[in-house]
Amino acid sequence: MKFVQVIDCKTERFDDVDRLMDQWVEQTKGRRTATHSLIGKDRSDGAHYVEIVEFPSYEEAVANSKLPETDRIFQEMVELCDGTPTFTDLDVVRDEQLNQELSRRFFHEIAAGGNLDAIDEVFAADYADHDILKEEDTVVGCDGLRSDVSRWRSAFDFTVSLDRQICEGDDVATLWTLTGIHKGDFMGIAPTGKQCTMTGTTIFRFKDGKIQEGWWHHDVLGLMRQLGALG
């Protein structure tokens, strides 16, 4: 079970605290067990800071706290703060990666499922699309994406499996595999009825809860070879 520790403190010397944290990261490199850390500043109180640290488990957090550097850095941090920082220990009982779920919704519900009306719910109105198949670098807008999805669905009956997803900040990278039957014209290739697969990677960038920009890299040459278009 994931474990999260919330550290609450007040300080007028955040720059010094920040440098102290950099020292701790450097000195514990390869041994620290935290997987994610962020620090937030209270907008209503400029001296109030909250750090949220994620660990794979409570046991990993305990191991992290036993590092000699951790105790020393903490004592130095206390000296920079107005009072002793407080700790809240949390077992994570629900963890939703909202951007990841929205990305999955595109592949499963829109692309494979055919719910093109959902594009306006998932993508920003000025969505920018970068695709190696396009002569122009960028197509802007939901209508352009809707047209692209329609062309693929006209050419293939397909499903999409999501082999791996990585989320970082506002970006979600997806490694996917398309499996389908060639039923319609595709890049000038008449329907063959052949079963085919294609792998690809898509990076979606999110803004204000919607997909703002996308980059597509897929094995089109491999797909065309399966359709008999290449020797």
Image (tube, rainbow, N blue to C red):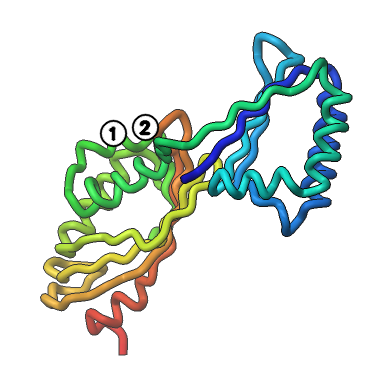
x, y (%) of residue 163? 37, 63
Residue 44 visible at all? yes
Count of marks placed on residues: 2
Q: What is the quadrant of the C terminus in the image?
A: bottom left
Q: Residue at x 79, y 38 (%)?
A: 21
Q: Residue at x 36, y 69 (%)?
A: 199
Q: Residue furthest bottom?
A: 231
x, y (%) of residue 92?
46, 37
The one nearer the camera, 119 or 209, is: 209
Q: Position of residue 131 (x, y in %)?
A: 42, 57
Circles 2 and 1, Cβ within 8 Å, touching? The answer is yes
Q: Quadrant of residue 226?
A: bottom left
Q: Is residue 116 above or below residue 148?
A: above
Whether residue 136 is visible: no
Q: Is residue 112 left or right of residue 3?
A: left
Question: What residue is pinned by disc 1?
Answer: 120
Nearer to us in this view, 126 or 18: 18
Is 210 drawn above or below residue 100 in the view shown?
above
Image point (29%, 44%), residue name: 105
Residue where numbered disc 2 is placed? 125
